[in-house]
Amino acid sequence: MKMTGKLKQKRKTHLTLMVVPDDTGKIISVKLGAGLFLSIMALWLCSVVVSAYVISRHVDYRATKAYDRFLNQKHQEFAKEMLEMRDSVKRTVEIDSQLRDLLQLKSKNAVIKYTGFGGPSYLDTKLLEKSVKDGDEVISRKAFELAVRYVDEQSKYSEKSFQQIIQYITEQRSRLTAVPSGWPVKGWITAAFGSRIDPFTGSLSFHAGVDIANDIATPIKTTADGVVTFAELDHGGYGNLVTINHGNGYMTKYAHLLKIIVSPGQHVKKGQVIAYLGTTGRSTAPHLHYEIKLNGAAVSPVKYLNKEVALK
Ligand SMILES: [Zn+2]
């Protein structure tokens, strides 16, 4: 019986909180059960955790706001650079237009058709310009997009257009360099173009070129770009002869040569040395017989000799 009684005894644990105020010295003491104490402690812990969470969220928010401000500032800087690029592209397009006017290129429309696929115009970029001017905190994505597309498409247009201008100038230049001009060798004309008394037969004959006299072995230069069609030693009365085809109906002939240094099929440039002055064939003294043919007919070389094309 005694043993059972002892077992039934419950050990109750209490905690006593004592508050001792300074002034009165009267002690306030509160007796708390262990369960209640633990509950209070748990509540306190919860409130600490929740507060920490709320504070950390607030810190995050401030950081995000700061980052937002940084991004907006970057957008502003980018927008300004974008506008500078746009103006530079616009100037390039204007220069292109002036160049075309100067060259009187008529195919401008074809080029615009090729690259102009209805993209944003310069006016569409005013949206971005306004945002920058107003110092908008947030610049719309559309404003950026329009400006970027304008710069992109106009740049592509300019690139194509300049390529076409280069091609045009190259063609013009090659057309000019393909027309005989200047002297194949400096010297004095000893026989003019046209009818004359043949020095060998004594009868009237047609002289299809001009004779230019100079020292033997003086270098002879071609008077236009072209392809060598004939380069033969001892070609009848012509002696050693070179013929060059320049395209556009022009051909030149160089006769009585001492030495030939080009061969058939070879491309030659205006001013390139092709042979040396001689007196081969029907010739009485060192000279070059120089002929120009236009569409198969011999023409007087005089006006071509005195025409210099300044290309370099
Ligand atoms: Zn001659």
Image (tube, rainbow, N blue to C red):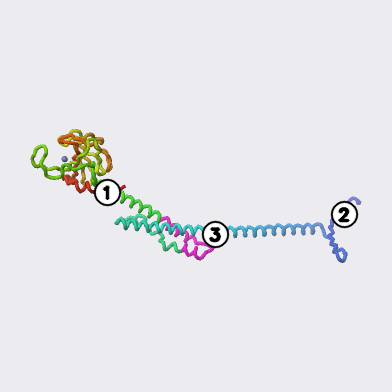
Return the residue at label 3: 73
Residue 202 in the image, given as x and y percentages of width and height: 8, 39
Residue 64 in the image, given as x and y percentages of width and height: 60, 58
Return the residue at label 1: 309
Relative side of 294 to 128, left or right: left
The mark nearer the N terminus, 3 or 1, is 3
Amino acid on which the number 3 mark rests in the picture: Gln
Relative side of 45 to 300, left or right: right
Q: Secondary structure at mark 1?
A: loop
Residue 128 in the image, given as x and y percentages of width and height: 47, 62
Packing grade of label 2 (10 A; few <14, some 14-19, many >=20) is few
The mark nearer the N terminus, 3 or 2, is 2
- Quick one: 56 or 186, which is closer to the camera? 186
The quarter holding residue 121 reads bottom left
Return the residue at label 2: 9
Amino acid on which the number 1 mark rests in the picture: Val
Packing grade of label 1 (10 A; few <14, some 14-19, many >=20) is some
The quarter holding residue 231 reads top left
Is residue 182 highlighted in magenta? Answer: no
The mark nearer the N terminus, 2 or 1, is 2
